[in-house]
Amino acid sequence: MSSSLRNFLITRALLTIPMVLILITMVFFIMRILPGDPIRSELGPKATEEQVEIIAERLGLNKPLYQQYYEFLWQMITLDFGNALTMGERPIKDELAEKLPATIELTIPAMLFTAFFGIFAGAYAAKKRKKAQDYGIRLFSIAIYSIPIFVMGLIFQIIFSVRLNILPIAGRLDPLLLVTFESPTNFYIIDSILTQNWAALRSTIAHLILPALTLGLALTGVFIRLTRVNMIEAQESDFITAGRARGIPENKLHYRHALRNTFIPILTLIGLQFAILLAGAVLTETTFSWPGMGRYLVTRIQLRDYNAVQATIGVFALFVAVISVVMDVLYAFIDPRIRY
Amino acid sequence: MANEKDVLVQIRNLYVTYGTRLGSVSAVDDVSFDIYRGEILGLVGESGCGKSTLGKALMRMIKSPGEITGGQVIFNGEDIMEYSDKQMRDFRGRRTSMIFQDPMTSLNPVQRVDEHMIEAIEVHEPKTKKANITDRITSLIERLGIQKRRLTDYPHQLSGGMRQRVMVGLGLVLNAHLIIADEATTSLDVIVEANLVDQLREIRDEFGVTILMITHNIALVAEIADRIAVMYAGRFAEIGPINDVFEDPMHPYTQGLLRSVPSIRLDDQEELYKMPGEPPNLTQPPSGCRFHPRCPQAIPICARIQPELLETKQGRLVNCWLFQDQPEEAAHPIMVTA
């Protein structure tokens, strides 16, 4: 690692801190502005004032706001996160250790699918510019972009799970296998390979297909359009003409020279889309009963579980920040003009 | 200096038309000439006269909405207009190569110099061994005055002059016979330009390649070319050996063009000649000779009938009624579209 790359990484890491700090601060206050609180949402409408006070005392919710904020910041800095305020008040760290791997296992394949499929379809559309294939792909990209994720998820469930009955409708793993499934990391694919549980691996992958496809397709539209536009621009560049004048075959010019030059904006998009992907994961996880961070977040927002929501969003923010740094480092590998 | 045997490319009645909203533009209009093997032919003219289009047409690289609408380009005895796409791809690079105006953008920014060259060899001569490729590239690049270690550089790490030499090298590495330099030195500063021009001449001498030098810089042509072709509004005005044309320009356009070249002499009292009028709108070219509205020596027939590019003296061809027999108008009722 060059020293300038190290400096770059340090700078980026330092810049991430205020970003995450501002975000979690906003979440902290917004959660408390929202009507309702974790105690009443758990106890229900018939709770008496004394009951609420006792629990508030125990959870520390009767302390002044600045003190709560201070304690919350300390929890975030030490990455301890404290305990959840509802549903058994387990340590949030343990809960996230279960939920985060599920979300990663869903979003990474979705991202890979959307990037590969979107880039290829966009490049192909650019090659067939103004022909039927191009119009078809563009129409597809608009359609896919405008269908809400949960609608698409439901359609897939109806087609593949209900009608054709070839893929499971929801969950991460067959409930019968889940009973005996050993999961030290909570990444089911990794766990099933480690324990050589091939039945579980098959089941995990079968469960993954529909949610990953739904989430991936939802983002494909943007990739198609960005790739297509940049490819068309690259096709006009002088080095493509020069390559053609050297007798380099068109396919090579298109898929090697032009495409490699469009990877820079695409990489930027991958970084940006990751945030949207996580938002999409919330909808996808809810649709497919996927026990990940997204569904966890939805449940805990409904319960006004301040601690859990703050921690989850903090982790999301870190996740996005890390991805964007990784993308910036990747630029240097793709574009020799960029050096850190 | 050249006889029939030495002809490398014969261009016959070549037409290139661009379809625009305002109608079709004949950017190259019935152009015929020969390029001799081993010569440097300078092709000059104002911007928009069709010289770049002509250069691209020689490689069949006209992009839509442009189209080659007629004529032949006979290269080594074969008409490349008859070639299939595959033959054309083989022809490009191996037989001809092209150097473009902007050295900043004509190399792929994410590809190293050697990758460009290796790719060209692998595409055209797929059976070449890796070691041979490396040897060939290394010796070539050193002959072009670029250090061997520069091969692993990316284009942005090279100077403009070096990049143009790499472009030249990309033509030479496949032993192309004809190098078309389309304003290749225009964007370089004068010293780098002079170096590259010198080098082009050396390359011609050493490799025996033929160079078609497309430029609006007449001084540059005077420096390097063996012959000069002057183009006006899609047609050739004049073509001939460089010294003859410079000493005794025949076509009134050539005369005007040569008088409008600035001289660097400080005591020069002479004002630069300003050619009257403007280049014609090629959607509606003037009738007859396309230069007649701006021509100080125009005679009545010029407005009506188009002259032909005919040989007047040994090796000199002029497209002007002043140098050819005027036909009886009744005998030649040529209808010219206005």
Image: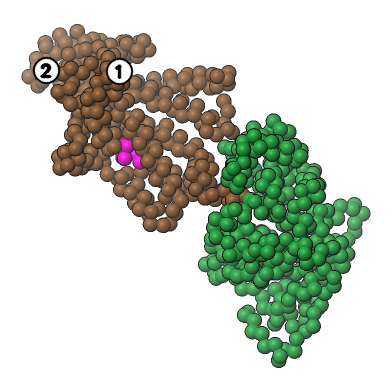
Q: For label 2, count other residues whose C-alpha is less than 10 Å away and answer few (under 14), some (14-19) or many (20+).
A: few
Q: Amino acid at mark 2?
A: Leu
* Disc 1 chain ID: A
Q: Which chain is green?
A: B
Please tell me the numbered disc located at residue A43: 2
Please tell me the numbered disc located at residue B181: none
A218 within the magenta span? yes
Q: In the rendered view, tell whether residue B96 sits above or below residue B31.
A: above
Q: Which chain is brown?
A: A
Q: Residue furthest left?
A: A46
* Dot in front, 1 or 2: 1
User: Which one is earlier in the sequence, the residue at label 1 or at label 2?
Assistant: 2
Image position, residue B36 (x, y; %) = 76, 61
Q: Quadrant of residue A286?
A: top left
Magenta segment boundaries in residue numbering: A215-220
Image position, residue B197 (x, y; %) = 78, 48
Relative horizontal placement of residue A259, taking residue B315 as reference (left or right) = left
For the point 24% across and 28% down, the residue is A202
Q: Residue furthest right?
A: B267
Q: Which residue is mark 1?
A: A194
Q: Secondary structure at mark 1?
A: helix
Task: Tell me which colouring the rendered structure shows.
Answer: by chain
Q: Is residue A110 among the parts visible in the rendering?
A: yes
Instruction: Mark 1 and mark 2 in contact? Answer it, CB < 8 Å.
Output: no
Image position, residue A145 (x, y; %) = 32, 44
For the point 76% across and 58% down, the residue is B37
Q: Residue furthest bottom?
A: B330
